[in-house]
Amino acid sequence: MASPTIESLCCVSTNNAFSKDFLADFQSVPYNAVSIVASVLGITGAIYQVLPRTSVSRNSSAGRGFYKTRGRLIIRWLALADLMASLGILIRSASWLADNTFGSKPDDGLTGQFVCIITSGMIHYFYTATYCWTFLYALDVKLVMQDKRISHRVYHLVSWIVPVVLCLTGLLILYLPDLNCHSKAVNPYIRFLPNYLSSFIPIVVVMIGNPVLYCLAFSRVEKQIMSARGRYTQSERRVVDGLLKKFSLINVVFYLCWLPNIINGIVLWTTWDDLPKTFVLIIWYLMAILNPLQAVFNCVVYRSWDSDSTIPKPGVVIRKLWRKKSSQQLEDTATNIDDSADDQLQDGDESAGEGSLAAAMQVSHERTPLLSTHPNGSKNEKSQERITPTHTLKKYS
């Protein structure tokens, strides 16, 4: 699971009574077995989303294709962050199963602590990145509905740099100046609270911000459709209702996966002196299951494999790459021939120049089909199709 509780346990003293009560539960075979199974499922779901896809529909407009591409890119980066976070959980749980002496033997505690710190930091960072990508997906929906867009470079800066700042702030305060963070002399509000805030603030922002962004995105949908087409048909109503349902499910999935973490933090900070251990263990097992399964649930609610795309087979990918390479070679050959003809025109005499000019014209005529977008040289009329709000909404279907 992704929790600052485990990150604080990474610096537990081997002689601390707290380690005897709670660290043993994290080191237990059932807990780590559940974590490994959930992380493997999360990795599988994330890999499925990251796999490249090809469009099987040839009737979609250029604008709609552009919008779909934006949505898929955000979903893929979200899946990549999920993949790395689930991998961190898998490594940490496997290491705990392999070395059950962490927190019990002074001579082995330091190595176990560093493994715990590195993997927990990895999990913290990449799950924070998933919160950012989830928020930016909702923001992108709102901007597209307003016919606006932000460069994906800005999205990447936010999604990869903000987690760095939050993680470093929380973990450095927690682990410095020493790893004995559970000493009685330590002020928990100074040592622990910043790390908890760096973990929970992004979750709360998504829980509050995403429903608001989706509501704002759809608040004027009917009005925009009416202004664009002069009508609001049953078909368009079904599209809008379906997407409202989809975005509601996206919010439900996020709440399902991360609400236990918020509950865990509230319970720990309000009942620290008298923790309800049974309740806390139940919450920890829920987090161990639901946090990695975010990638699996995202496969369903985001539907990165929509109806007009499919995952190509390896043989199809190889054939397409070979055709692309062959086409590029033909174009380069034609360009070289044309350049040779131009050189002959410049260096030859008048009669030779006339002959070269004829050859160049012939070569140019032969090369034209290779360079034109369409065989008849005309522009694709569908690329000029008006992008209505319904087309824009279907980007996320």
Image: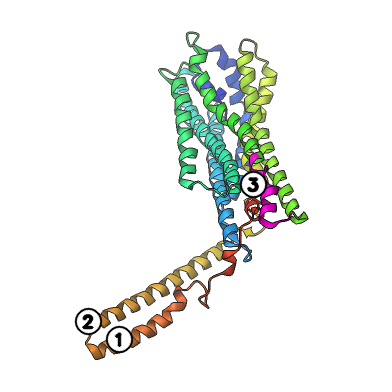
Q: Amino acid at mark 1?
A: Ser
Q: Amino acid at mark 3?
A: Tyr
Q: CA distance from mark 3 to mark 1?
A: 59 Å
Image location of residue 27, percent across then percent down: 58, 25
Q: Is residue 294 placed above or below 23 in the rendered structure?
A: below
Q: How packed is label 1: few (under 14 Cα within 10 Å), some, or many (20 or more)? A: many
Q: Is 230 a magenta residue? A: yes
Image location of residue 219, percent across then percent down: 68, 42
**Which residue is the site of mark 3?**
302
Residue at the image point whose x is 38% and y is 82% from the top: 363
Q: Is residue 166 placed above or below 312 in the rendered structure?
A: above
Q: Earlier in the sequence, mark 2 or mark 3?
A: 3
**Which residue is the site of mark 2?**
347
Residue at the image point whose x is 62% and y is 62% from the top: 60
Residues at marks 2 and 3 touching, judged by CB atoms closer than 8 Å? no
Q: CA distance from mark 2 to mark 3?
A: 61 Å
Image check: 150 left or right of 298?
Answer: left
Number of the front mark, 2 or 3 = 2
Q: Which of the 4 image quadrants contains residue 28? A: top right
Q: Is residue 280 visible?
A: yes
Q: CA distance from mark 2 to mark 1?
A: 10 Å
Residue range highlighted in magenta:
216-231
Residues at marks 2 and 1 touching, judged by CB atoms closer than 8 Å? no
Q: Is 224 a magenta residue? A: yes
Question: Please, which colouring scheme is shown?
Answer: rainbow
Helix, strand or loop for the magenta stretch, by majority = helix
Image location of residue 53, percent across then percent down: 58, 57
Q: Which mark is residue 197?
A: none
